[in-house]
Structure formats: structure tokens, C-alpha cells
Amino acid sequence: MPESGTSISSSEIETREALLQIVNSYIISQCLYVAAKLGIADMIKDGPKCCDDLVAASEVHPPSLYRILRTLASFGIFSEDAEGRFTLSPMAQLLRRDAPNSVRGWTIMRGENFLWEPYGEILHSVRTGEPAFNHVFGMSAFEYLAKNPDVSAVFDQSMRSISAQKYQSVADGYDFSEAPMIVDVGGGNGGLITAILNKNPQMKGLLCDLPHVIEGAKEHIRAAGLASRCQCLSIDMFKEVPAGGDAYTMGNVIHDWDDEQCVTILKNCRRAMEEGARALLIEMVISPRNQPHLSKLADIEMLIMTEGGKERSETEYEALFEEAGFRLAR
């Protein structure tokens, strides 16, 4: 408390309130999780509804749901009218399942226990350098996903939800005309290779990942109508990467691993590549000091969820490439 006779300036009050807004932001995130999990945006996409109207579809306690939506509306997510009914705001539109740039899957994953609980143990990671995920669940995140298909499905949906626009930007922004065959290493559910093949009908592709991932990827490749142009292959990228590609892509793969493991993956790619082939990495790049950027938040997630994974600066990427026998072109 200030001493008697002193006053707090308006700028000090604003600074304090700004800090508290950040401190309390997890409450907003959890409210968003509830709205996304219940599919509220889909229920009110055709017009305003009060919480009583949402009971049958969502099996909720109407007064409690009202408190959630009222809070979200105060931050511009949903909008409440004079009759206590809620409609979609521009941000709430993105919580719809069918929104072109939907973030519903990502929002749901952010509130699930397999992600939420490790964040509650973040201090363990800071004190030990070890992933809080392993501390909570007794195994790595990749092992956990392999053993829990339901959780893996949530993770898969979240990745498709958040990556579609990014991968389309890759397909639109890079000239693949001289790469008739693309090998996607650690290709996950196929979001990246699907975007590239759809943009380049002359190309063929090979999606490579772990066995339990490949099974789900095959379904997405078939659903995209690309089964005749894209094969799926189970591999261990730490042992070998298949040859024959003109371009080798890795989307959000390298950030999962420590430097030594990254160099192993890159060297395996380098050995598989023939003259003229290129490796294309799709990763965040840490912004300069003091500049806010999503990469710095993602880096904290790597600290908590992986054994040595991290987001890297351009200089750090250059060092990895050089050790693995690559040269950074652009």
C-alpha cells in the first residue's frame, strides 16, 4: 500500500491492470475451452439464443453457461443482446466447426488435461530442465499419444485446425514446379503434403511418420482424393529416410527435438537426397529480444512437453544445417 499522502498515477494503474489482465488470461482460455467443447458457436450460428435454449443440445446448467458466455462476450468473443441472448462475433465465428479458418480443435486441445496438467507443473521444468509432461504422466508426450487413441485424435484435430492456413501459405508461396516427387518427413496427418499436392497436380508424394500416425494419415489422404498420388510409409526418421524425393519437407518436426537429434534427422535426409534435391523446413523463428511473437510461447510449450525440443533463432538453424551438411538458401 502507498504511504499516507501519496497517490498512484494513472499510468501506474494502467500498468497494473495490464499485468493483471495477463495473469488472469488462463481464465479466458478455460472459458473458451468450454464454449468450443460444447460447440456453442455451431448452436447459435443461425441466430441469437439464450442459455435456456442451449440446454437440450449441450446438457449444461443454464445459469453457469450464461456466466461463461457473459465473460467471453466482455472480451469480444460472442455478443450479448438486451434480452440475454448470444450471437456470434467475428472471433466467435472462428469457433465453428465449418469455419474456413476454424480454431475450434486447437482451442479444445488447450483445455484438455493432457496439456493443462503439465502446465501446472511448469516449475518442475524450470528447476530441472526436464519436461513437465513426463513428470506428470511418467512417459513422453509421443508415447502417451501412441497409447491413447482418443487423446491422439484430439491432438490430430487441433493440428489440422491450426495448421491449414499456414500449410496453404507454403503451397502458395513456394515454387514446386521442379520437384515432381515430394517426401514429407514426420508428415503427421498429411496437412502439409495435401496442401502442396492439391496446389501442384503434376506432383506425387510420400508421407512418412510413425505407424500409429500413418494409419490416421491414410484416411485423410483418401478423403482428400489423393490416394493415387500420395503413398504413406511407416518409418523411424532417426534411422533412415527414404530416397527418391526432389523435395523433402518437414513441418513442425525439428522443434520437437534437441540439437543432436535434429542433426541426426537432417543427416538422414541429406543422405537420402540426390543432386539438386532440397530440404524445406516449416518452423517458427524466434524473434529478436523484447519483440512479442508466438514463437516464444511455443518455445515454452517445447520446454514443458518435449525432451530437449525448442524453437530456434535463424542463427541456431544455420548451425544445425551446417553440421548436417546443408546450406541455408532462404
Image (tube, rainbow, N blue to C red):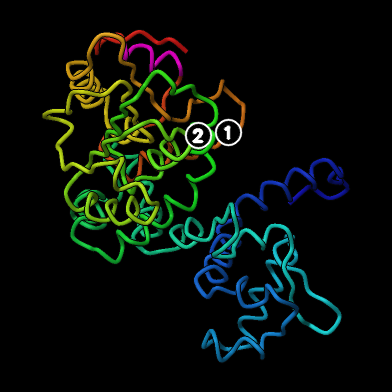
Answer left or right for 98 relative to 246: right
| Contact (Cβ within 8 Å) of mark 1 with mark 2 | yes
63 shown above or below 150: below
Q: Give the magenta part as a residue range.
A: 314-321
Between 31 and 158, the residue placed more toward the observer is 158
Question: Splitting the image into 4 quarters, where does residue 152 fall?
Answer: bottom left
Residue under label 2, please give it: 296
Secondary structure state at the residue bearing disc 1: loop
User: Can residue 256 be seen in the rendering of this structure?
Assistant: yes
Type of amino acid under label 2: Lys
Q: Is residue 124 visible in the rendered structure shown here?
A: no
Residue at (35, 45) in percent of width and height:
190
- Residue nearer the viewer, 114 or 202: 202
Most prominent secondary structure in the magenta stretch?
helix
- Name the side, left or right, on which 207 lies relative to 197: left
> Along the horizontal axis of the image, is 246 left or right of 74?
left
Task: From the image, tell me which residue sits under label 1.
Answer: 293
Cα distance in 3D space between marks 1 and 2? 6 Å
- Regarding mark 2 in the picture, which secondary structure is present there? helix
**Farthest residue, direction left:** 239
Q: Look at the image and say whether residue 317 sits in the magenta stretch.
A: yes
Point out residue 77 in the picture as x, y percentages from the top left corner.
Answer: 70, 63
Rendered position, 112 above or below 232: below
Q: Position of residue 231 (x, y in %)?
A: 24, 42
